[in-house]
Amino acid sequence: MPTRRQFLAVGALAGAGLVAAELHPRAVAADPVPGGTLDPNSIAKYVTPLFILPAMPVANGSGPVDRYDVAVRQFAQQILPSGPPTTLFGYGAPADAGTFHVPSHTVEASAGRPVRVRWSNQLVTGSGNFRPHLFAVDPTLHWANPPGGTGGRDSRPTFAATPGPYRGPVPVVTHLHGAHVTEESDGYPEAWYLPAARNIPTGYARVGSFYDRYKAEAASRFGVSWDPGTAIYQYPNDQRATTLWFHSHELGMTRVNIYAGLFGFYLIRGGPSDLPAGVLPGPAPRAGDPPGTRYHEIPMVIQDRSFNADGSLFFPSDRGFFGDVPPGGPYLPRTDVPPMWNPEFFGNTIVVNGRTWPVMRVERRRYRLRILNVCNTRVLVLKIATNPLAARPAAAAMPIWVIGADGGFLPAPTAVASLPIAVAERMDVIVDFGSVPVGTALYLISEGPDEPFGGGEPGDDFEAADPGTTGQVMKFVVVPSPDADTSTPPAALRLPGYRPLGPATTARQVSLNEMASGYFPDAPIMGMLGTMNADGTPNPLGWGDPVTERPSRNVTEIWELHNFTEDGHPIHLHQTQFQVVNRQAQGRPPRPPESWETGDKDTVIALPGEVTRLKARFDMAGRYVWHCHIIDHEDNEMMRPLVVS
């Protein structure tokens, strides 16, 4: 039986014919990715303006620390251009219901000035009862497991028969991705907490295994007290000016919580690693901006999602959706296949800043775009084109100037025709519309595949995403600029000084692995990280195995990521910003990092059959994690503890 991956690779899945919203010659034909009862070809494109994400209001900005109060709630939001709104989980300021949005409003921080956030889990009804999850939570994984009580939480439970989905209160813990932060404020996957609902079932664990430890550390370090259903984290912002993001990070539930909407930008500005005001295009949205403010710095979150005809998000509730096992199983405990977890997920509709296929009116000037990939699995390969339906690879209409990545500015700007962005990566780019005639329509497209990314180029090494659906991202329409653009052209930019890490004194070899079912051929049952054996074979390890990654504080290490799987994996290390050294395929010389990877990074794509080398230094003792950021992989064993001694 062909697997879903094989179907996607040859474009053989049945689907409706393409109906384009605009007339463009099209040289290719494909079917959309399956999923949901709403045909993505029926969704009108480029009729909804791009939503500009506002700044999150500060609860208290006096004194030496900026304080934010941020809650998680359930609400409805208009994502599709017409029809019913979509029910979501999202972040917002509890004092202002209008701030709840997916993606979240942006937290603005200043370099060197701490930010303290009270993160509240308010997934309760108006009467105070807990809200169950929007999607099927697979209780057979190694997950938060509140029903296990204090003795069985954060475990992989066993069952006498295949269970249904978990329908209890939703655990939440928030991680600031890319932050240099002490352990209690990192959002450890076993530091989750349930809402302070009045109907938590008897015997349920209300907090994760590490919550109380970190609560005590926060009280000692910052003098704060965590109330039930909350955690208070403090971020020192003692790092370079950069683009970070925060997101849900619970053990075994990250994929469903992020898919439901729990993510947002966190921007650090100022300090010696930033540029003076006016050098780059601006302004960006700030709290208190008057209506009609024109913005030339735009944070943009790109996702792939699938929808049902009633406006709800579609997410698979059965492993049979993936196509490598029969619908309905048999699953655990009769076989080794989890009943609801799917190895990867690809949506068939592109969403930018919470709107499907939006349009943005851009002035004849330069724009700074901060781009974040929050797909579950999909690697975006972004390009600006004149025809969204052109045969792939399409001709680039203009260059994209990359000036920064995960950890701040690059050593120098680099111009690219297309830009790959893996899940969780951020790219800080400049696009210059200054010489484009008024009235011109341009399109941001993606030529990444509708399947796991393995490297290479579209057309040569993989089939690009369906040009009619997931191959389109958004539209730009050029309008006059009422004033002159005084920002510096990207080719003339002199970016702040960049200091590479010194020589490494030790090397660490780790492995990336995929474990196959013993019952169904070619059916993955989990991903695993691990170490390397002396003979060059991998030693896969699970989340609960003894900690093997124990770097010493202030020691610079080389990490060698040996990828034994067929897919590329975006690997994320907590606490630190690392530097990409090289990649090396077996029997080939090492390749240097790509031009957009030459600065500080916290996430890197490790390609199949290759060794990816990083240089990293950890300077704070504590317990953290490293993991694959394909969030379906992360949720099922492809994450390991990391303890800095």
Image: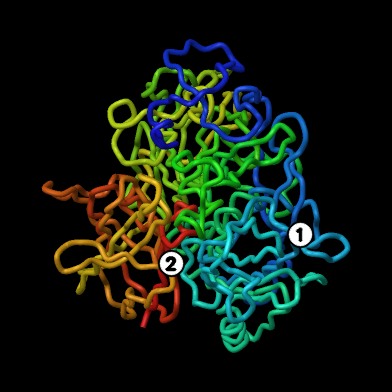
Q: Is residue 308 visible?
A: yes
Q: Tell me which amino acid carries mark 1.
A: Arg
Which secondary structure lies at badge 2? Answer: loop
In the figure, residue 455 lies in which quadrant?
A: top left
> In this rendering, which labeled residue sits more in front, label 1 or label 2?
1
Going by the picture, which residue comes out furthest to the right?
127
Residue 195 appears left or right of 188: right
**Whole-percent x and y of residue 223?**
64, 86
Residue 574: assigned label: 2
Write down the residue under mark 1: 131
Residue 264: assigned label: none
> Would you say the residues marked 1 and 2 are in contact, meaning their CB atoms lie under 8 Å apart?
no
Label 1 neighbour load within 10 Å: few <14, some 14-19, many 20+: some
**Whole-percent x and y of residue 46?**
63, 25
Label 2 neighbour load within 10 Å: few <14, some 14-19, many 20+: many
Residue 411 appears left or right of 159: left
* Whether residue 256 is situated above or below residue 532 in the rendered picture: above
Q: Distance between the residues labelled 1 and 2?
A: 30 Å
Going by the picture, which residue comes out furthest to the bottom?
220
Q: Which of 519 and 84 is in front in this view?
A: 519
* Whether residue 111 is situated above or below residue 285 in the rendered picture: below
In which quadrant will I find the C terminus?
A: bottom left
Of pointers 1 and 2, the one earlier in the residue sequence: 1
Q: Tell me which amino acid carries mark 2.
A: His
